[in-house]
Image (cartoon, rainbow, N blue to C red):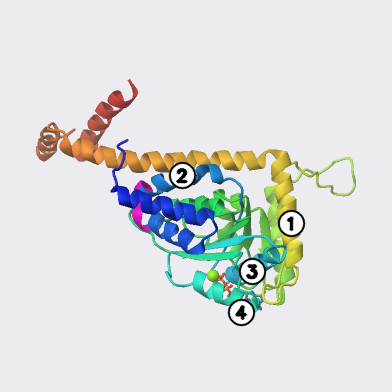
Amino acid sequence: MESSKKPSENDSELLNLIKEMKKGNRRAVARLITKVENGGPEVSKQIIKEIYPETGKSYIIGITGSPGSGKSTLTNQIASEYLNKGLKVSIIAVDPTSPFSGGALLGDRIRMKSNFTNKNLFIRSMANRGKLGGLAMATKEAIHLLDAFGSNIIIVETVGVGQSEIDIFKSAHTTLVIMPPGMGDEIQAIKAGITEITDIFVVNKMDRDGADKRVNELETMLDIAENIMVDQNNQNIRIIKSKKWRPPVIKTNALTGENVPNLIGLIETHHKFSKTSGLKKQRLTYRYKHYVVDIIQYFQNKDIERLIFSNPKINEFIDQILSYKIGSDPYSISEIILELFSKRYFS
Ligand SMILES: Nc1nc2c(ncn2[C@@H]2O[C@H](COP(=O)(O)OP(=O)(O)O)[C@@H](O)[C@H]2O)c(=O)[nH]1
Ligand SMILES: [Mg+2]
């Protein structure tokens, strides 16, 4: 990997911002996140190397669900609960569809709700898909920054649609999936990718009709997923609980805050479970495996383009392609080039 050379004043600006961020300067952390968003892995590399030993301390909560399910309202409630406990809370609203939604609105709501200016609250919305490393990558770096910033809790709110959002959630300690009543027949759709990342199902809008029905649907789905074992000797059907975590299903009203303290309790229970069961270590391993792959892919892609374009032999290969013969199509030629590469890298 080629080390990127930045002008030294740039370096000292970064170092200065990092120093300020560690002192708790919110503007500094905001600017660093912007640098990560715009500068991609070249800039992140310099930042992460500096701050890494200060990370690994925050508790990361992921919140996902369809638009309108109440994610932002619930995030507000959860953040308030933690703020009232005296904790430092950061919120990242990942919304690729609307650059200015989420964060700003959410901030207004929290500010409206509480009379004090929340020194302990930091809110950021991220929407920049960018070319450099992508949104999921920038979000991971932002999480590290907010971790080093000293956040006790980091809440990541995102619309659970694409693969990159799923990746973000695989990075969380505890992931909440919001399934309010009356939002069509989405359980079927949700089943596919979301169940594997769900730690707690939240039936928000419990004040609406159909909340109990939704709870039952989810419990039934979990029964099936859990591979129910029926005790034949017993007249009654007995469900033998597996040692795995079964996502609890909880109803909330994010407008009034009803049941939110119980939800916080479930998050705490899940936290304890993941520490004792080894799940926490498993998740961290997963997170950093993928992080490393992302980093290597990014830098290797850049290397590959440079190596191929600067290699004099490339024009011979292209001439072969231009002969339009069998075996000289772009795929076959790429395979040959790739083979030359892997010999170079691994022998
Ligand atoms: N009745 C009811 N409305 C809610 C509840 N939670 C959120 N809402 C409303 O649902 C709408 C969407 O909420 P929002 O938090 O923006 O959803 P998001 O798109 O998932 O972030 C807003 O009008 C909220 O006021 C709830 O528990 N009950
Ligand atoms: Mg929202």
Q: Residue at x 51, y 69 (%)?
A: 103
Name the residue beneath numbered marker 4: 112
Type of residue at label 2? Glu
Place of residue 227 in the rendered image (x, y in percent of width and height, measured from the top left)? 71, 45
* Residue receiving disc 2: 50
Badge 3 residue CB within 8 Å of ligand 1: yes
Circle 1 sits on which residue? 266
Q: Is residue 282 above or below residue 216?
A: above
| Foreground disc of the pair 3, 4 | 4
Give the mark nearest the N terminus, 1 or 2: 2
Res 262 quadrant in image? bottom right
Magenta stretch: give its range.
38-42
Judging from the image, what secondary structure is the residue with disc 2 in? Answer: helix
Q: Is residue 39 depicted above or below 319 in this figure?
A: below
Instruction: Say if mark 1 contacts mark 2, CB within 8 Å.
Output: no
Between disc 4 and disc 2, whose residue precedes? 2
Q: Is residue 168 left or right of residue 254?
A: left
Q: Amino acid at mark 4?
A: Met
Q: Are marks 3 and 1 in contact (CB under 8 Å)?
A: no
How many neighbours does mark 2 have within 10 angstroms: few (below 14), some (14-19), or many (20 or more)?
A: some
Front residue of 223/118: it is: 118
Q: Residues within 10 Å of mark 3 (few under 14, many from 20)?
A: many
From the image, tell me which residue sits under label 3: 74
